[in-house]
Image (cartoon, grey):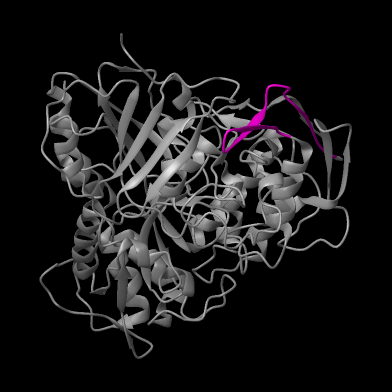
């Protein structure tokens, strides 16, 4: 699994039309996209691992062995059989699995599995994360029987953190997106799909229910039904329109300019619950809103060239004081309203409701007086009681408790959280310097990925599997921008990712989560709820907690007739 960063960027210019019950174009759905793509549609690359690329095309165009349904279960898609054991993983490709390539019908074969495995394995490719899942497979050892049966074997030698040996517990997530081997021959994996999902001839290619017919930067994408997908789409076309501003999305769905929105939550959304002709649904997502704390100039992910502005964040007691100072419930209530039932998340690896969830982080629930007591043991010059107006800032080992705070500037909700967090921290004598960055910068080469931050707030979208955070927390992991390193956590997460027994795996993840709750390299805030709003005559659409969101069954969407 590769967690997807939630990014908010460009704005789409809107024109007033119709109303919520306006007549739709025949067999076409217009969907508002929260943002534009970052660097392209190849989400395996570090440049392009943004949710928008998956939402606007990747999820609908590129399918694989399994897909994740609305219950979070992995169900067979392009295979009729799949099994994993301690030796490896085997697939039988469905005889109904085909690619569309510019009108041509091409069978899905084991070569498409092998292509993406070797592309991810290739150290020359700028992969966002290869150590979880694919890294366990040996790309040189496989057996195939004809074109439609293949077995891959787990690594048993030359193992490393990037390429671990042994099984991968969440094996159903492997090969969830295949790439067309025949259409990409001779292409540089690092350069494909900057503005299309296409073959070497520029013609669209897809094995999912739609193909990407066109994409215009800053405006959106046009998907058209793939005639060769085994579960033929009931719609002829889906158009994604980039509308980054939540208020504009609300206006667009209310006025009938779009047929559906799946936005980041904003208070304006609540007004849509009473609009005739609309269906408003909220449900939890496998998305964690969180803070990451940069540990000075500690070594982190490959390619990091910068350190944070203040080494005090290397001290666990400082990180503990910061979490104690944060009123996470007030953040939730301000964003979503009181009495919603949404509570702070007190585990990093598990979401509330999952079997392994334990409130390990609850010991750091909002308690500003305790934060001051910790700071008083190590620092001087701060307030004696919590006071947002005191203006006093602690000095610790000769350094001021002053940190830069970075967040996507295009996210109104995160701007609100920043203001609340800044006031919380000021009340206990910790100063904040605002450092917002545009959404297309914060996760790019000039943003968090180079390590140039102190506190950063954003969300990870996942498939709900706790082992997906391995690269985030392992020493020098591919997405470890914090510089955190615990060999004990490394060992526990690595062992859990290999363990095929669910009970044993849950226990290992639980032990790792308990250590993270003590050392606090990152602070979980809350599980993000998803809001899906669509016209009532648009049927078959529903929420999905996984990163694929409501698009997982896009082939079932249709207009009431």
Left or right relative to 286: residue 514: right
State the residue in front, 191 or 515.
Answer: 191
Q: What range is drawn magenta here? A: 88-108
Name the residue located 16 percent from the left edge and 41 percent from the top edge: 267
Q: Is residue 270 above or below residue 244?
A: above
Expressed as whole percent of the image width and height from the top left, the position of residue 380 reads: 28, 84
Expressed as whole percent of the image width and height from the top left, the position of residue 158 reads: 85, 63
Q: Is residue 106 a member of the stretch shown in magenta? A: yes
Marker count (numbered): 0
Q: Is residue 268 a member of the stretch shown in magenta? A: no
Q: Is residue 358 visible?
A: no
Name the residue located 89 percent from the left edge and 32 percent from the top edge: 145
Left or right relative to 238: residue 467: right
Q: Find residue 404 and report its image quarter.
A: bottom left
State the residue in front, 219 or 518.
Answer: 219
Q: Is residue 184 visible?
A: yes
Q: Of all residues shown, which one is farthest toward the top?
A: 561
Image quadrant occupied by the C terminus: top left
Q: Is residue 315 above or below residue 248?
A: below
Q: Find residue 123 and report its image quarter.
A: bottom right
Q: Find residue 227 and report its image quarter.
A: top right
- Overall secondary structure of the magenta section: strand
Expressed as whole percent of the image width and height from the top left, the position of residue 84 reads: 79, 34
State the residue in front, 462 or 474.
Answer: 462
Expressed as whole percent of the image width and height from the top left, the position of residue 289 reads: 37, 50
Name the residue located 22 percent from the left edge and 58 percent from the top edge: 415
């Amino acid at each position: 699994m590769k967690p997807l960063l939630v990014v908010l960027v460009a704005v789409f210019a809107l024109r007033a039309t119709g109303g919520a019950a306006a007549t739709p174009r025949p067999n076409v759905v217009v969907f508002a996209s929260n943002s534009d793509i970052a660097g392209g549609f190849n989400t395996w690359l570090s440049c392009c691992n943004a949710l928008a690329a998956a939402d606007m095309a990747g999820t609908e165009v590129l399918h694989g062995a399994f897909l994740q349904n609305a219950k979070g279960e992995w169900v067979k898609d392009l295979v009729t059989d799949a099994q994993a054991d301690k030796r490896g993983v085997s697939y039988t490709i469905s005889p109904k699995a085909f690619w569309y390539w510019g009108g041509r019908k091409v069978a899905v074969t084991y070569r498409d599995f092998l292509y993406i495995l070797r592309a991810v394995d290739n150290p020359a490719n700028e992969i966002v994360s290869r150590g979880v899942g694919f890294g366990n497979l040996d790309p040189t050892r496989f057996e195939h029987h004809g074109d439609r049966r293949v077995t891959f074997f787990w690594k048993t030698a030359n193992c490393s953190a990037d390429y671990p040996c042994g099984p991968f517990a969440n094996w159903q997530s492997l090969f969830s997106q295949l790439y067309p081997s025949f259409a990409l021959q001779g292409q540089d994996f690092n350069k494909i799909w900057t503005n299309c999902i296409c073959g070497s001839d520029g013609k669209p290619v897809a094995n999912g229910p739609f193909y990407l017919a066109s994409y215009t930067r800053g405006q959106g994408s046009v998907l058209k039904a793939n005639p060769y997908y085994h579960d033929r789409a009931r719609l002829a076309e889906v158009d994604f329109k980039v509308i980054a501003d939540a208020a504009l999305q609300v206006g667009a769905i209310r006025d009938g300019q779009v047929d559906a929105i799946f936005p980041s939550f904003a208070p304006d959304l609540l007004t849509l619950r009473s609009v005739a002709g609309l269906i408003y649904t909220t449900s939890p997502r496998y998305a964690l809103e969180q803070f990451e704390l940069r540990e000075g100039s500690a070594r982190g992910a490959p390619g990091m060239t910068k350190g944070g502005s203040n080494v005090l964040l290397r001290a666990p007691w400082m990180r503990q004081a910061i979490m104690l100072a944060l009123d996470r419930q007030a953040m939730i209530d301000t964003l979503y309203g009181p009495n919603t039932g949404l509570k702070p998340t007190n585990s990093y690896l598990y979401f509330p409701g999952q079997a392994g969830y334990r409130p390990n982080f609850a010991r750091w629930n909002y308690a500003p007086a305790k934060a001051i007591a910790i700071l008083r043991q190590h620092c001087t010059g701060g307030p004696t009681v919590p006071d947002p107006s005191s203006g006093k800032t602690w000095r610790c080992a000769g350094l001021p408790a002053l940190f830069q705070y970075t967040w996507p500037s295009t996210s109104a909700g995160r701007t609100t959280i920043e203001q609340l967090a800044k006031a919380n921290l000021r009340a206990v004598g910790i100063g904040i310097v605002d450092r917002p960055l545009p959404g297309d910068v914060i996760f790019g080469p000039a943003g968090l990925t180079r390590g140039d931050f102190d506190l950063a707030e954003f969300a990870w979208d996942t498939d709900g599997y706790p082992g997906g955070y391995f690269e985030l927390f392992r020493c020098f992991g591919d997405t470890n921008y914090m510089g955190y390193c615990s060999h004990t956590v490394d060992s526990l997460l690595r062992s859990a990712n290999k363990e095929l027994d669910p009970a044993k795996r849950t226990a290992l993840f639980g032990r790792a989560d308990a250590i993270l709750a003590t050392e606090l390299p990152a602070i979980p805030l809350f599980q993000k709820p998803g809001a899906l709003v669509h016209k009532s005559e648009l049927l078959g659409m529903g929420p999905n907690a996984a990163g694929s969101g409501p698009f997982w069954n896009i082939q079932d969407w249709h207009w009431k007739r």
